Amino acid sequence: MISIPNLSASLERQRGPLLEAVQELARIPSVLQEAENGAPFGHPIARALNQAISISSNLGFRAVQDPDGYYGYAEIGQGEEIVAVLGHVDVVPAGSLADWRLDPFDPQVIDGVLYGRGVQDDKGPTLAALFGANALMQAGVTFNKRLRFIFGTDEENLWRCMKRYLAQEEKPALGFTPDAKFPLIYAEKGLLQATLEGSNKQGINLSGGSAFNAVPDSAVYVGEAAEKLRRQLERLGYAYQPISGGVQVIGKAAHAQVPEEGVNAICRLAIALYSCGVHSPAIDFLAQEVGEDPFARQIFGDLEDEDTGRLKFNVGMIEGGETERLSLDIRIPVSIEKENVVERLVQTAERYGLKYQQRDWLAPIYISRGSNLVKTLMEVYRQVTGDHLSQPETSGGATYARAMPNCVAFGAVFPGREKVEHQPNEHIRLDDLFTAMQIYALAIYALTR
């Protein structure tokens, strides 16, 4: 049990300044705008980074900003070892403003809930940790290690900020990112995105999907076999609607980390076309090797492990034309070698004249549940919340923890609360924000002893 004199009063004094700082930072629409007059990710993101640095400096941290604008950090304490808290100041676009109850970049509190883009992902939690550290400072705590808050600027896209940081700066010994949920995530599957391409000599016109990491809810065929396709779709019980000159197959969207929760319209279209005698490399591959199996067991067998479960396989997009292209998102259990997965996929795809090309790879992370980092963070979480039922979790998604060695995702969405990042009306309850600040303060204290 951690007990720090004067910390409770110090945390109470941080509440107003924390809320004000989150609102200030969330007012900046820090959405990616590539290479804008010296700002690598656009002036709004540069402004947000400047604001985070300014807030940190005003709290007494030693603040450093990359001269090229890729990252910044704020540091306190002494010693060779660095304990890092990794957050990001960029956000996704707001989407349709009609779906928001208020201006997404004018954050307001309604009935104890703060609404605004970035208040949950990731500006609010990052500042909660920063102000938690400041509460320790105000309570007279000194840090036996260096505590470094690292502010990323490209998390919502290609993580170029952290690639630049790791190339130029000291690597932390350990740390956490407030980029997911409590209690914590100790393992994340490997994330492989790839394409399969083949020559479409049959001239079949197919299209569908919008992203690698989303189960497509629509796929379209335009051509002479439309009427036959409609009859086959009805026999199979697949939802569709006629369009001019063709057919649109209707699926159900889901995230690629849980493809079993969706209905893949591309796969259904391929199955139906194959059944009516319409063939191409992509159609035949999907119909014969994938079907509607989100685990692609025909290709890979039952690949799974105890910690992170089954391999997940999503066909996110299909493009027609002279070259057919399938866009794949594959979530690989932490104990399974990527090379084994690729070898099986390549061998299968080649039988259909499809060529494999890797697009992106995020290696898995695994921090033992018995590690000092995981045990310390769990003890702090349980002390503050009294929640001894929730256990460390694994994820098929990708948190910012992958950007740093020996790092885990730790909060800030509590069990039972809705994860609303990237959605209209993104929000965070103030009592959750303040509880997270307390958790982060004790975690920082424990990790820097």
Image (cartoon, rainbow, N blue to C red):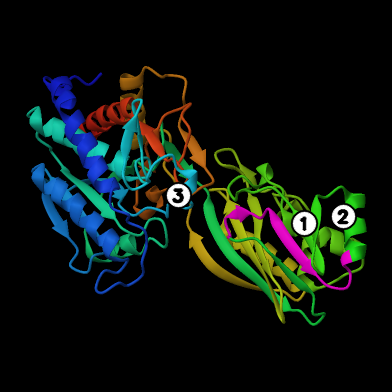
Relative image position of residue 156 (x, y in whole percent)? 41, 56
Quadrant in the rendering for residue 144: top left
Decide if residue 151 is in sight here: yes
Disc 2 vs disc 1: Cβ atoms closer than 8 Å? yes
Per the image, is 301 magenta? no
Amino acid under disc 1: Val
Per the image, is 223 magenta? yes
Residue interval drawn in magenta: 211-226
Relative image position of residue 327 (x, y in whole percent)? 63, 65
Disc 1 vs disc 3: Cβ atoms closer than 8 Å? no
Q: Which mark is residue 233?
A: 2
172 displayed left or right of 397 = left
Quadrant in the rendering for residue 392: top left
In the rendered image, which residue does mark 3 sit on? 97
Q: Quadrant of the N terminus?
A: top left
**Residue at horizontal 21%, vertical 33%?**
132
- Which of marks 3 and 2 precedes in the sequence? 3
Relative image position of residue 326 (x, y in whole percent)? 67, 67
Residue depth check, mark 2 versus mark 3: number of the one nearer the observer: 3
Relative image position of residue 166 (x, y in whole percent)? 29, 61
- Which of marks 1 and 2 precedes in the sequence? 2
Q: Which mark is residue 249?
A: 1
212 displayed left or right of 109 = right
